[in-house]
Image: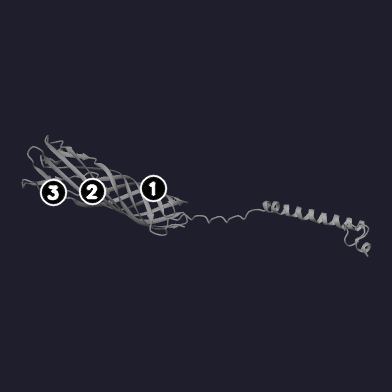
Amino acid sequence: MKKLFLGDNSSGSFALGLPNWFAHGLRATATLIGISAIASGLAVPALAADMPMPVKAPAPPIVWSWTEFYFGVHIGYAQGSTSWCTTLAVANCAADRISQDPYGIAAGGQFGYRYQISNLVIGAEYQLDGMAINQTSPSPADPNGTRYSAFNNLQSLTAQAGLAFDRTLFYGKGGWALTRVNYDAANTVTGLDVSTPFKWVDGWTVGGGLEYMLYTHVSIGVEYDYYRFNIGNYTNILNNAGGVVGCAFCSFGRSDVQSVIARLNVKLWPWGP
């Protein structure tokens, strides 16, 4: 019986009493299975490392649109030009004629609406400059005389049209303009003086600019504006001594203002993606 179960090898190497050739075959098969399992275990991480990583879908492209209400601020340089004459010191108005070019800072704000159709952008805008530019010059006819001109509080209401190229806008504008003017003629020795109160005068304006979107709701730009005003004669005005100056401020030549400003605009809505 022992031989039947243990075979010739009494050490128990072949516990089932199998022939030696069969036992060696089983051992070789078991070895191959073990080697295959180890190789498979080593190959799995390598295959995982070679697999492509998932790719995140690209973000949708930003749509740059100029359509929306907007408000903003601006600051820049303004220069005016005006000419007139007075009979405060002489009978002939043309003898005491002055030309002046006041200049200074223009700063204020704007509010408007734009609508974009393909590359075409149209809109309307109200703009206010808290401008106060003035100039005092000597009189050409009165050795002791001074002549003064001032433009204040420049306003405009304009229509706009332009072309948009992605986030860049080129535009022109034109419309109605308004400002307050003040004129004064005086003699520094006698103290004689005639002056106009600040008076609103209207006119027209044209201009143009370039604007660039920093974000979908914020843009910066630069703009040039030309304003022309209709100023009539100031006649039969009392001077400070009670006398009547027949042509206190007359024969106005070209009276205009030019400005170059830097602008910052913010859309009311939407606030971007």
Q: Of the residues under marks 3 and 2, which one precedes in the sequence?
A: 2
Residue wearing tag 3: 235
Asked whether the residues under the numbered discs 1 and 2 touch, taking CB atoms below 8 Å apart as contact, a structural biologist would say: no
Q: Quadrant of the N terminus?
A: bottom right
Marks 3 and 2 in Cβ contact (< 8 Å) = no
Crowd band around label 1 with a 10 angstrom C-alpha radius: few (<14), some (14–19), many (20+): some
Say which of 53 and 256 sits in front: 53
- Dot 3 alpha-carbon crowd within 10 angstroms: few under 14, some 14 to 19, many 20 or more: some
Determine the residue positioned at 10% across, 43% down.
193
Q: Quadrant of residue 44?
A: bottom right
Can residue 215 be seen here? The reply is yes
Amino acid of disc 2: Asn
Kind of residue at badge 3: Thr
Residue 79: in sight, yes or no?
A: no
- Image coloring type: one colour
Q: Residue furthest bottom?
A: 1
- Place of residue 55 in the rendered image (x, y in percent of width and height, measured from the top left): 60, 55
Amino acid type at circle 1 is Gly
Choose mark 1 or mark 3, whichever is in front: 1
The disc label shown at residue 152, or none: 2
Disc sitting over residue 221 in the figure: 1
Percent coordinates x, y for residue 146 in the rendering = 14, 39
> Closer to us: mark 3 or mark 2?
2
